[in-house]
Amino acid sequence: MQSFQGKTAVLTGAGSGFGLACAHRAAALGMNLVLIDVQADALSAAAAALSPTGVAVMTAVTDVADAAAMDRLADDVMARFGAPHLVFNNAGVGTSGLLWEATTAEWDWVMGVNVWGVIHGVRVFTPRMLEAAKGDPTYQGHIVNTASMAGLLTPPNMGVYNVSKHAVVALTESLYQDLCLVTDQVSASVLCPYFVPTGISQSGRNQPKAVADTELTASKKIGQAMLDKAVQSGKVSAQTVAELVFDAVRDNQFYIYSHPQALSAVETRLKAIVNQTQPPDPFAERPQIGENLKQALRGG
């Protein structure tokens, strides 16, 4: 997509983090905005902050895991702006803890937002974008799905999150291949950020009651503390990631990384898969952290 001026961007999770940063970047490029978030106060604040830019802003308090709500949203977007040109399926939540300690409510919540939210975004907007492409040879569309480096790795004590983000990577790779079969006017990218200071580590603020009322196990408390520290110590900003996203859309670049240096761990994992060896030690370069985690989980 070579030009953004006057086109429409749909962004989920737009009240904070990457969604908000990408909304500001889209506004700077002259795009109409559709801001979606489950948190009404954050969404209102985002809309107020973007109002001075002068671009058209539509907001929708929407649970991306709700199929019917996403169907209505797509209809509302079409009525206001027509088919969008950029869809940023970004809404996501984080969680941690040993895999077998996760409740079904926690699985439903994480998979609902992180996976079904992306599925619904693809399901409701892709056909409309393809229809627009058929009717206009100059139309260009792009879908960006937010995964994580956890979608390419398997860090311990955060298995539910890993599963959800691996699903997003596979979904987006499949989407890219399917789009290549039917059009040259709509494409896709997957965003795989590492630790960036956003609100992902505080996803508990939007937990459903069934998850919030669950007693935290030792592994979840330890994981939360480690995640808080890692996220808040990140040196790459959400604004920098937003620039990377729009550069990728412009250049039709599929994989988007906030920390390319983390790909060495991905390469090590892939070699283990090809060579049929055991999954690699995620703490090989920081053994003391691994040992401390092991001792904490074993009660040592």
Image (tube, rainbow, N blue to C red):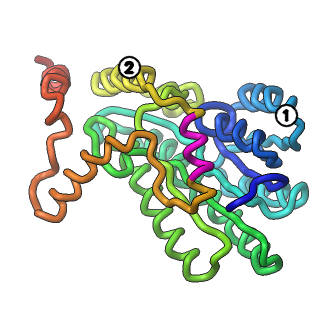
The residue pinned by badge 2 equals 229
The residue pinned by badge 1 equals 53
Q: Which quadrant holds the C terminus?
A: top left
Residue 263 in the image, given as x and y percentages of width and height: 31, 47
Three-letter code, disc 2: Lys
Residue pushed farthest top?
300
**Residue at the image point whose x is 17% and y is 28% from the top:** 286
Callout 2 environment at 10 Å: few (<14), some (14 to 19), or many (20+)?
A: some
**Residue at the image point whose x is 9% and y is 57% from the top:** 277
Q: Is residue 43 above or below residue 113?
A: above
**Residue at the image point whose x is 75% and y is 32% from the top:** 43
Q: Is residue 114 above or below residue 123?
A: above
Q: Which quadrant holds the N terminus?
A: bottom right
Question: What secondary structure do most residues of the magenta stretch adopt?
Answer: helix
Q: Is residue 99 magenta?
A: no
Residue 293 in the image, given as x and y percentages of width and height: 19, 25
On the image, which quarter does residue 8 sit in? bottom right
- Residue 173 appears left or right of 154: right
- Of circles 2 and 1, the one toward us is 1
- Residue 163 appears left or right of 90: left
Q: Is residue 101 above or below residue 185?
A: above
Q: Secondary structure at mark 1?
A: helix
Q: Earlier in the sequence, mark 2 or mark 1?
A: 1
Residue 264 in the image, given as x and y percentages of width and height: 25, 46
**Residue at the image point whose x is 30% and y is 22% from the top:** 222
Three-letter code, disc 1: Thr
